[in-house]
Image: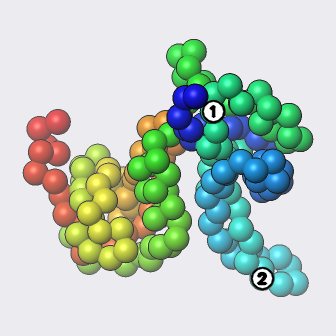
Amino acid sequence: MEELKWFVMYTASRSEKKVAERLREKGLEVYLPLVEELRQWSDRKKKVQRALFNGYVFVKTHRNQLWECLQVPGAVKFVHFSGQHATVRQEEIDIIQRVVTTGVAVETDGSVIEPGEKVQVMGGPLQSMTGEVIERGNKDYFLIRIPGIYQNMLVNIPRKFLQVMEDSASS
């Protein structure tokens, strides 16, 4: 039997949690990265958890069981690229988990990293991770590309933890 792989499922809008729950009930391994947000209503503030990637859940299964997974209410389809089902490597799932569990804070020391430069994280919870920087306003953002779904994760990382990688200028 072929190995288990992480497939990328597209769900109906705002039903990621329900779909993940139903797939787990079927005994499947599911990863739904959630981030906590403080929402402001007129009468109160509340912490809510939302899906990091809108409309996506990761399902670890065999290719021949994909159809079965789609039978749960709220499941729409599996993501395809050039005729193949998109899969995500375990290392990429681990990176997403690391980013989500650390919830990184923002502060900058003012020195500039140009947008598009490749950087390595030199300290803090995401140490040794590499990615590409995008700058917005006066804060440093660290961009991690998740190749399997062509999604980008934008993470705030203090400038002091970022080091420009040597070969980034020539590439």
Please give the residue where the numbered disc 2 appears in the rendered image. Answer: 45
For label 1, the crowd category at 10 Å Cα-Cα, with few meaning under 14, some 14 to 19 and many 20 or more, is some
Classify 135 as above or below 123: above
Residue found at the far bottom of this picture = 44
Classify 101 as above or below 81: below
Please state the horizontal and vertical placement of residue 166, each as a whole percent of the image. Answer: 10, 51
Task: For marks 2 and 1, give the one nearer the viewer.
Answer: 1
Please state the horizontal and vertical placement of residue 156, each as a whole percent of the image. Answer: 42, 67
Classify 154 as above or below 63: below
Name the secondary structure under disc 2.
strand
Please give the residue where the numbered disc 1 appears in the rendered image. Answer: 62
Split into 4 quadrants, where in the image is the N terminus?
Answer: top right
Quadrant hosting residue 38: bottom right
Which mark, by number, is residue 24? none
Can you see residue 159?
Answer: no
Quadrant hosting residue 6: top right
Q: Do the residues labelled 2 and 1 touch (CB within 8 Å)?
A: no
The residue drawn where x is 51% and y is 61% is 97
Q: Horizontally, is 109 left or right of 61 in the view?
A: left
Q: Which of marks 2 and 1 is nearer the N terminus?
A: 2
Please state the horizontal and vertical placement of residue 85, each as a whole percent of the image. Answer: 59, 25
Residue type highlighted by circle 1: His
Specify how the rendered protein is coloured.
rainbow
The residue drawn where x is 71% and y is 68% is 49
Name the secondary structure under disc 1.
loop
The residue drawn where x is 62% and y is 50% is 53
Please state the horizontal and vertical placement of residue 40, each as a whole percent of the image. Answer: 76, 76
Residue type highlighted by circle 2: Lys
Q: Horizontally, is 70 left or right of 61 in the view?
A: right
Q: Horizontally, is 13 left or right of 65 in the view?
A: right
The residue drawn where x is 88% and y is 84% is 43
